Amino acid sequence: MRFGIVVFPGSNCELDCHWVVQNVLGQQADLIWHKENTLKDYDCLILPGGFAHGDYLRTGAIARFSPIMAAIEDHARRGGLVLGICNGFQVLCEAGLLPGALLRNTSLNFICRPVHVRVDSTATPFSAACTQGQVLCVPINHNEGRYYCDAETLAHLRDNDQVIFRYVSPEGKASDAANPNGSLDNIAGVCNEQRNVLGLMPHPERAAEELLGSTNGLLLFESILSYGRAASLTRG
Amino acid sequence: MPEPPVTQEIIAAHQLTHEEYKRASAILGREPTLTELGIFSVMWSEHCSYKSSKVHLQTLPTSGPRVLQGPGENAGVVDLGDGLAAVFKVESHNHPSYIEPYQGAATGVGGIIRDIFTMGARPIALLNSLRFGPLTEARNRYVMSGVVGGISGYGNAVGVPTVGGEVGFAECYSHNPLVNVLCVGIAPIDKLFFARAGGIGNPVIYVGAKTGRDGIHGATMASETFDEKSEERRPTVQVGDPFREKLLIEACLELMRTDALVGIQDMGAAGLTCSSCEMASRGGTGVEIDIRLVPRREEGMTPYEVMLSESQERMLLVARQGAEATVREIFAGYDLDAVVVGRVTGDGVMRVRDGERVVAEIPVKGLVADAPVYQRPAVRPAWQDEVQHLDVDTIPLPRDYGEVLLQLLASPAIACKAMVWERYDHMLFLNTVVGPGADAVVLRLKGTDKGIALATDGNGRYTFLDPFTGGMIAVAEAARNVVASGAEPLAITNCLNFGDPTRPEIMWQFAEAVRGMAAACGALQTPVTGGNVSLYNETMGKAIFPTPIVGMLGVLDHISHTTTPAWKEAGDMVVLLGETREELGGSEYLKVCHGLVQGRPPAMDLDLERRVQRCCLEAIRGGVVRSAHDCSDGGLAVALAEGCISDPENQIGIDVSLPETLRPDALFFGESQSRMILSLREAGLTRLQAIADHHGVVVTPLGRTGGSRLICRGRTVNIDIDLAELDRVWRGSLPASFGQE
């Protein structure tokens, strides 16, 4: 599969995503500078974590105007996969590719630590390799990770099975104690209606090697690869 | 606009002594202009010139087979093998962090990162060593929150993970916190860059943020003691912009992949002045700068202000003639300024022009090599005997040892610091094999089987009680921490935080501590590759504890040697390497339970230290060891408790029996040096014993892991505490100080 990793000025997880795609999964990956306005034929785009344009304004508020964004929207419209991790999730929300917004953590502090998330839908190209209700241990690393949307949007997300990950206890129970940032309905990750764009606050690339403590995040990448294999079979 | 005349008041305001002013005039052969006075004053400030510390620093060992670059450059460089070099340095930002905690700490992070990528290395990790006053005072909580916030805000956004460090507390840091930040980067050995202005006629190029009036005289501020009016100095603290620094890192590293660059240095303390004349000094050249060409964000700045501004996120570089366009193009890609502001000259003079008008013309040698050097008087203070005197017979034995253990675990110095490091991105770059909270951090080196380990250490209380021993222990303990993680210690960087060097007793502390560090660095074969001296850490005539901070770098031959402090499995044996003596002086126990900062710190036998470390490392490399932990603050009991609870995912109890050969409080809470606690499978014990015998190290079996309680059995000592209780106290203490559950 061909992965494109979008680099905004201030992104900082692009090399990590590149490492996992290339060295752990053995796939091809390009880094794409935000000033580009065309994209090659990628199967999956990753918007990595970081602080695009410094995020001095609302997170992602400037990145959504980067030249590359139109090409990303086009890629998504044509059914291409887009994975937004942390700051990438914030950018996708700001750009309207995903519903909702990410607000400042209720603690008002930056939080970097492993958390538990439950897979609440396996019906996406990003979570198909998981089992329904599976609990994954994946690190978060953010100051603005509190998912928020209005009541109508939330109802819509639930009805359409668009909430893919929720913060839970190690036993899989969603509770306030297990919610690290005050996210509405413990939401850690959502997808769009077409299910080809996913954003999540936890960093799956930080849980992709045993040496670093967890391989739970690999399940997302493996889901993407099986989806890619199936798609190329259909095409072939 | 002509500059105002230089009067006696102006000279005094620049903190130059009468002799120093005369020296400057002699170098010039005339009276200095105001701009020249400003330049002399910052270049000859303690912060930039090391005038009081130099004679002592010269006694430190600085070379060794692995040292590629010792002191004198932006950072030290150590050969890691496999064609890779580690570039590392620690620096202080104490004074700004008291005046404005958030920005003071943030710009400290920014400054040290620039020192690392200047050398051609991608910065891969930060550590910090922090000291605050007691958290019972609101002002200290404010300072600590601000400092941690600044490190978090800047470090996370600039994209360099903060992987470890330590935090300590004592009354003396109430008005003078310590913020020492260490950065490490990795570079290919054949792609290192140096801060040298070479090639006459080559362009001098200014890159990065624009210059403003912020931070003028930051370097002289950092060379003064504080008084009630210190808060009025807030405008000398700069405001950091981590986003711009991130762009600067990427642009500089991209430029370094071309052949355009000749030399490069960041504009830190003393800004454009220091960077230009230090580069010329190292290159044996001169430099000419036209300040009209310097990008500015304020109007009407004088030459004096432009030369002395400490605006952040700026670099000065020397490029090959003809490569100007390449430099401009790369920086434009990141929307950064890159402007030719001058040339390298051959006359050895630093010449500053304001358009056609020359406003400063100073021989570089006069500013740098001929800067004043002082052999300041050093006298052992009269009160030293008094603080070293401790009659242990007057110290009552505890009634409940379990209660003492809980008290120590709750002490902020020992308590779990997760609430601090969870605010730092400590995982970026996917190298963090062992993160904050262990003895040392371990980072893998991608593309090799190796890893590096880093630890910071420095006990101000020990150094106060006995500066020579404190200096030795700072080095020895940092090395021991690195060994406990499975690495071989290679070299150190140090940050020497002391009081006013014009006071003989402070100078004595300094000289003694450096003598101790030199002895330990020699014995442990860990040379000094650079660092920073921070003097004048005093407020209203009261100095901090003399606090030398050591940043130790080690290498793991194979990342599989990585070892952590926590027990791995029930049924393992736990042993003590080294010997416990009846040493209570300077201990956390004396401080916390008896309110005493008294006695001599534990003795340091460097030969024994080396043998214990070698023994531990050989046992780890031989695959015998399952966990290793330095036995230090809070002594044996605290180290055992940490072995039980430090891994929240896998807490395992222990049952220990110890014959009470010493005073039981010294046995359990004393801080005798050169001790480590290992756990291993029972089958490995014979092998460990053989290794220990070979190194002449005593191994004492302590007990066995298992269950969910920490149990210590003795004749008078009887500790029996549930791990959940230990964990609650240890993890809950620091958040509780800040009113959090």
Image: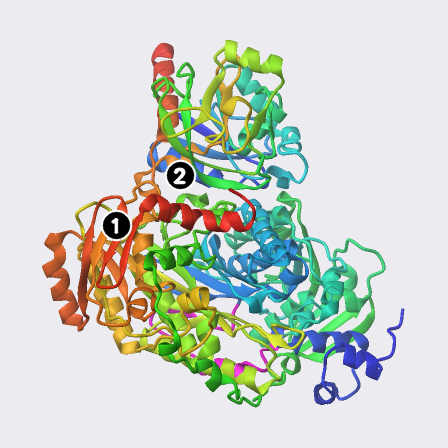
Residue carrying label 2: A19
**Three-letter amino acid code of the residue under disc 2:** Trp
Given residues B559 and B734, the one toward you in this image is B734
Residue B295 percent across, percent down from the top left = 74, 56
Residue carrying label 1: B560
Secondary structure that dominates the magenta span:
loop
Q: Chain of mark 1?
A: B
What residue span does the magenta drawing correspond to?
B48-73
Query: Would residue B588 be found to the left or right of residue B713 on screen?
Result: right
Picture quarter containing residue B629? bottom left
> Which residue is painted at 38% across and 14% down in the image?
A231
Residue B468 percent across, percent down from the top left = 42, 81
> Which residue is painted at 73% across and 63% down in the image?
B231
Q: Chain of mark 2?
A: A
**Three-letter amino acid code of the residue under disc 1:** Ser
Which secondary structure, mark 1? Answer: helix
Given residues A106 and B348, the one toward you in this image is A106
> Which residue is painted at 75% across and 77% down in the image?
B14
Given residues B174 and B510, the one toward you in this image is B174
